[in-house]
Image (spheres, rainbow, N blue to C red):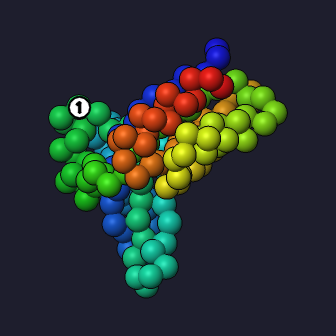
Amino acid sequence: MGTEINRVDIWAASISDSCGSLACKFRSLAEVGIDIEFGIARRCHDIPGEAVAFVAGISGAEQERAAENAGFKETESLAALRVISDDRSGLGASVTECIAKAGINLRGFSGVKVGNKVVFHIAFDSNEDADKAMASLSEI
């Protein structure tokens, strides 16, 4: 397979830090046929009772309207890349080292290995940083 690197749009929604809040948001997306390719949620430690959910995989006007109706907004304050590759020892180190050598500070990083494939979602502070990172990752 090699390595596939793509830009991805990230959508975010505020949610209550309570049982079932994330399930409710995800159900709203599922009911209109949105197939979430990536999702992560976390508490807002500086705002008690609040949390935030991030998703990727929303595309097209109909899905965008449905996501907005469910309280999601496309983020304008971060840019993201998705890296899909055959797994190999040290791949995470190689990816993050390439980005560091390009002088780019990461905003966020997540990764998962499923079978012999690995998927990383990497967030940056700007489109320029994401573009620069994409160019630096061409060598992995």
Is residue 123 found left or right of 9 in the rendered image?
Answer: right
Q: SS class of the residue under badge 1?
A: loop
Residue type, mark 1 in image = Gly
Q: Which residue is located at x 55 percent, y 31 percent?
A: 136
Q: Is residue 41 above or below residue 75?
A: below
On the image, the x and y values in percent for residue 128 come to 37, 40
Q: Which residue is located at x 29 percent, y 33 percent?
A: 59
On the image, the x and y values in percent for residue 25 come to 36, 57
On the image, the x and y values in percent for residue 87 come to 73, 29
Residue 15 placement: quadrant? bottom left
Q: Nearer the viewer, residue 37 or 130?
A: 130
Residue 27 seen: no
Q: Which residue is located at x 55 percent, y 39 percent?
A: 102
Q: Which residue is located at x 22 percent, y 46 percent?
A: 66
Q: Is residue 28 above or below residue 114?
A: below
**Residue under numbered circle 1:** 60
Is residue 60 found left or right of 44 in the rendered image?
Answer: left
| Residue that sits furthest to the top in the current view | 1
Q: Is residue 69 above or below residue 65?
A: below
